[in-house]
Image (cartoon, rainbow, N blue to C red):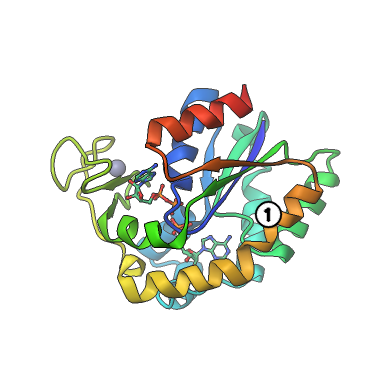
Amino acid sequence: MKIIMLGAPGAGKGTQAKMIADKYGIPHISTGDIFRANIKNGTELGKKAKEYMDQGLLVPDELTCDLVVDRIAQPDAAKGYVLDGFPRTIPQAEALTAALKARGESVDYAIDVDVPDENIVNRMGGRRACLACGATYHVSFNPPKKEGICDVCGKELVLRDDDKPETVQKRLDVYHAQTQPLIDYYTKAGVLRSVDGTQDIDKVFGDITGILG
Ligand code: ADP
Ligand code: ADP
Ligand code: ZN
């Protein structure tokens, strides 16, 4: 099962992608997590990506597409995967379509987690992230068992640099300009499914499993 998560920053893509990955036994591939891991490890890619991420801008397609095409060719992705945060531009979607087509494959579902901008700003201020394992929490909507500590791996949780209100607004603008057109792209491809992302986390997941079966 090859699944793409679409939706604004903070819509709940990562939260749902992790639950999908666990339920269906497929890898969760998050380009944001990959970039943050590279930043943490001080790689060349991390240095370049950070310049864009800190400003709320997208990392250029040249630095992003090959990375994902290589990742989905790994053995653990043979039975499928859930892509979270990729594609984010039309050229990225076209690169993915071409890479899959070369192997006689295509995306099965593009799940749009729909949340209006007004709700996003609240969510981002309360988001806490584990940079070690990629888990995310919310101080009120989805708190960790122990304040400030990741339930999954025990590491300390942080407020991401790009979750500050000034940057969140920029990221929303970028989303509307560059990523939202993908809804049309995947509607035309016949694989778009929308879910109401303003519901509770478990309710959203119920809608998604209703779609995936
Ligand atoms: P969010 O959880 O808000 O959706 P992500 O963790 O997916 O954020 O991404 C954080 C940042 O990493 C983005 O604002 C962008 O700078 C960069 N990024 C992640 N995925 C991509 C991508 N597919 N193309 C370009 N930039 C990306
Ligand atoms: P994305 O990957 O789309 O940027 P996340 O999954 O990281 O989004 O969720 C953004 C924030 O909102 C996190 O703090 C998360 O715990 C919280 N969150 C996710 N889904 C919901 C929901 N359905 N209701 C309320 N808060 C949510
Ligand atoms: Zn963790």
Picture coordinates of residue 134, whole percent (x, y) = 37, 47
Q: Is residue 73 above or below residue 19?
A: below
Identify the element where label 1 is drawn: helix
User: Which residue is at 62% across, 63% downward?
Assistant: 179
Question: Is any part of residue 58 visible from this angle?
Answer: no
**Residue 54, quarter of picture:** bottom left
Picture coordinates of residue 154, whole percent (x, y) = 21, 39
Q: Nearer the viewer, residue 115 or 19?
A: 115
User: Which residue is at 68% across, 52% downward?
Assistant: 69
Ligand 2 closer than 8 Å to the CB at disc 1? Answer: no
Q: Outermost residue toward the left?
A: 147
In the picture of the structure, the residue carrying the numbered disc 1 is: 183
Q: Nearer the viewer, residue 200 or 145?
A: 200
Amino acid on which the number 1 mark rests in the picture: Ile
Picture coordinates of residue 63, whole percent (x, y) = 61, 68
User: Which residue is at 55% across, 40% downward?
Assistant: 195
Q: Nearer the viewer, residue 132 or 105?
A: 105
User: Which residue is at 45% across, 68% downward?
Assistant: 46
Q: Nearer the viewer, residue 148 or 123?
A: 123
Question: Is any part of residue 207 visible from this angle?
Answer: yes
Q: Residues within 10 Å of mark 1 (few under 14, many from 20)?
A: some
Question: In the rendered view of the protein, which quadrant contains the C terminus?
Answer: top right
Picture coordinates of residue 26, whole percent (x, y) = 56, 30
Q: Is residue 63 left or right of residue 158?
A: right
Question: In the rendered view of the protein, which quadrant contains the N terminus?
Answer: top right
Q: Is residue 135 left or right of residue 55?
A: left
User: How many marks on residues?
Assistant: 1
Q: Is residue 123 left or right of residue 204?
A: left
Q: Is residue 50 left or right of residue 25?
A: left
